Image (cartoon, grey):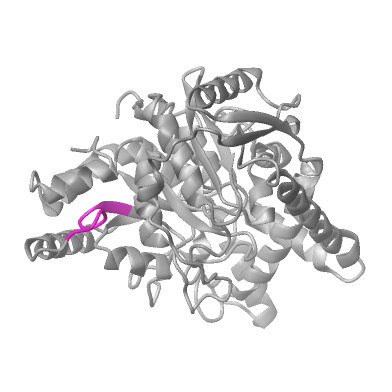
Amino acid sequence: MHQLTLAEIARGLADKKFSSEELTKVLLARIAQLDPQLNSFISLTEDLALKQAKAADARRANGESGALLGAPIAHKDLFCTQGIRTSCGSKMLDNFKAPYDATVVAKLAAAGAVTLGKTNMDEFAMGSANESSYYGAVKNPWNLEHVPGGSSGGSAAAVAARLLPAATGTDTGGSIRQPAALTNLTGLKPTYGRVSRWGMIAYASSLDQGGPMARTAEDCAILLQGMAGFDPNDSTSIDEPVPDYSASLNGSLQGLRIGVPKEYFSAGLDPRIAELIHNSIKELEKLGAVIKEISLPNMQHAIPAYYVIAPAEASSNLSRFDGVRFGYRCENPVNLIDLYKRSRGEGFGPEVQRRIMVGAYALSAGYYDAYYLKAQKIRRLIKNDFMVAFNEVDIILGPTTPNPAWKLGAKNSDPVAAYLEDVYTITANLAGLPGLSMPAGFVDGLPVGVQLLAPYFQEGRLLNVAHQYQLNTDWHTRTPTGF
């Protein structure tokens, strides 16, 4: 039962082969048995899950249907869930129980999804390895000595290990697509504004976007259908009709123009990954796609621009965590300044502190124009590069990551080396474009992903291409040994 995809679960529930309650109990037992190896969950919500599963079964008995009705999922632990700890992977929020549901949580619950728990993550979504969590590092089920990627590493590891069929993640600079690539999943970052950020604890407000993580493009289409839509509570939400993502999966790829940026195949890319990407291109050509080399000349500036803009926004967003109204508070402060200093110094981990300091510096008087303003100008140039490219091609294809998953702790002494793992994913966030990573093969037994980018609100096209690719390859069906 644990091997079933979301789509298969929907069919099984509709055909009364099993109930949501039976499935939920099986998966909760599996999590209890196997997650100690992975550390992919921060909180389990057994009582809530069984209550929701029984309610879903009752709704089906009354004639209701729906792809998510009774389907088990988990939420990355920065989506607020009413009455349940929402920690953001941080000591700062270890004792915080959200007083309301995030829009994404509420929408999926209304669709009948069953919440099994909250998944582990890099602290405040800052990281590429899921090693900065207050609750400890998450392990990659393909090799427990390696990272699963971050910051949505808990969601990725749980789905890859078949603890559940799908989970939510968030993507600020690649945090859905990168862990999806490193754990053999399909992960989709929607267009900025497509999925509500209300109730999603902010890292960098102009970059963050929630999205689905699952084993197949078909499952991502189902989960995105439940997540997407306009939200008047979110000022960055865009009032754009949500298409039927599942309906577009079976479209032909004949004549599809795929752009391959020459900048992607530089010295920083593992040549074995480059070979797998070229194999993926050949597979898509067999399906009728037309390949064209393109250029994204400002891509080289993406990392430095991102690591000015994101920390700047983080330093502003995280200023609210001061030990006064909620979250961690130091013991016996001698005065207000001591309260601020020690609560933040003790509540935030080193990676979060590093980014707050960088951001505060970039925004400080005398440096704003030199750093933050210049980074925003580069951001615009990167967006313009994409607009030019999409006049020539329908989608853009390349590697998701320059390397396969690295060993736990291997990059801890060199934060910049970890930052460089996001080189291919960051540009989509800076431009606000939708991006998808799908399984493309293995290097030394570790999964590799291929990334697809599309124009705004063309998530359906990405899912269509990924689904057709997955109908003709079997990378996404591989299961890690022992799970």
Determine if the magenta segment contains residue 70.
Answer: yes
Determine if the magenta segment contains residue 90.
Answer: no
Q: In the image as oriented, which residue stretches furthest toward the front?
A: 255
Residue at the (40%, 41%) spot, across then down: 217
Residue 323 rendering spot, x and y as whole percentages:
56, 75
Residue at the (42%, 33%) spot, across then down: 468
Q: In this rendering, is residue 193 above or below 4?
A: below
Residue 253 rendering spot, x and y as whole percentages:
49, 34
- Is residue 381 left or right of 220 when viewed as pictured? right
Which of the 4 image quarters holds residue 364? bottom right
Q: Quadrant of the N terminus?
A: top left
Q: In this rendering, is residue 94 above or below 386?
A: below
Which of the 4 image quarters holds residue 263? top right
- Is residue 70 left or right of 106 when viewed as pictured? left
Residue toward you, 6 or 281:
281
Q: Mark yes or no: residue 180 visible.
A: yes
Q: In this picture, which residue range is highlighted in magenta?
A: 65-73
Residue at the (29%, 30%) spot, across then down: 483
